[in-house]
Image (tube, rainbow, N blue to C red):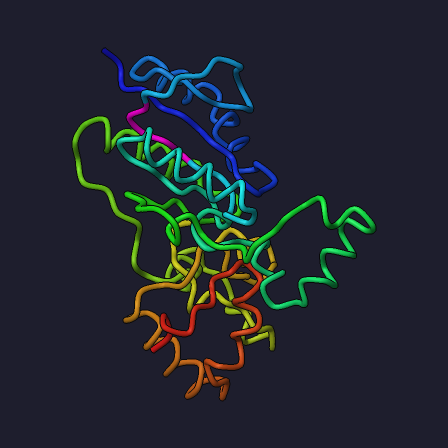
Amino acid sequence: MKPKIAVFSLTSCEGCSLAILELENQLLDILGAVEIVNFREAMTERDCDIDIGFVDGAVSTPTDVEEIKEMREHCKALVAIGACACQGGINSLKNHQNEDDYRSYVYGDGAKHFPTIKAQPISAFVEVEYELPGCPMVKEEFLALVKAVLSGQQWALPQTSVCVECKKQGNLCLYEKGIICLGPVTLAGCGAICPTFGSKCEGCRGLASDEALQAASINLREQYDIPLENILADLRFYGAYQEKSLP
């Protein structure tokens, strides 16, 4: 019997779910080895007996809390996909604002009909076996994870920072141009796509390992005279900043 896979969405743009569909021919290869039993973006059928559940989106409403607990109950393994599911994502910007203000701005007079809570990653509510960070998640990592799990092999995210990948690409460091980039403190795995195309890294993959953070802190202070604390506000954009995570 083929393993059963499901893709769920909470509070998000569902871009990570769409990224799965964008795999096209590679997705067809996966379909030969698994059975997709729940995927709002692609099908109407449903099944509650699930081997691997992929979850896109943050927990940002009381309904999200109920749904993620139900997903956990029906999935043998749960995978958070994308910045929202892994860190809270852009949704977590509301955590730094007055609730009455942002609710009124978004919903107007109907705000009372749309309950909300502090936006958090799904790991704040249930156990998660794997995480695929990014905005959107990296499709190649999705494929690698699925293949590893199906074959019983070990799989893990890289533990270096985006700076390592940027150097491999031969990019001129944006700090040399006077641009504050989050590459030194952000988890690698995206191929440094943003700096490669001229944009600064905004930390959508979350914080790198403690070792990488310590190295970045020293380098930023000694080479560019920038304390690590000065980039914390930027780290909040995708919910990557957690005080306990910093060295």
Q: Which x, y percent locates residue 228? A: 46, 80
Q: Position of residue 165 (x, y in %)?
A: 40, 57
Residues 113 and 72: in front is 113
- Residue at position x 56%, y 58% in the image: 92
Please tell me which residue is depicted at 28% across the width and 71% down the height of the picture. 211
**Above or below, comparing residue 8 to residue 137 in the picture:** above
Q: Is residue 199 left or right of residue 53?
A: right
Compared across the picture, whether 39 is left or right of 200 comes to: left
x and y percent of residue 62 in the render? 54, 46
As drawn, is 81 to the left or to the right of 202?
Answer: left
Residue at 30% x, 46% y is 127
- Of 247 and 171, nearer the camera is 247
The reply to whether residue 95 is visible in this rendering is yes
Residue 140, magenta (yes or no):
no
In this rendering, is residue 219 above or below 36?
below
Q: In this view of the protein, which residue sits in the foreground, 135 or 57? A: 57
Residue 20 is situated, as x and y percent measured from the top left of the image, at: 47, 29
Q: Quadrant of the image for the N terminus?
A: top left
**Is residue 191 visible in this depiction of the protein?**
no
Segment tinted magenta in the rendering: 50-54
Q: Residue furthest front?
A: 112
The residue shown at (71%, 44%) is 113
Image quarter where the C terminus lies is bottom left
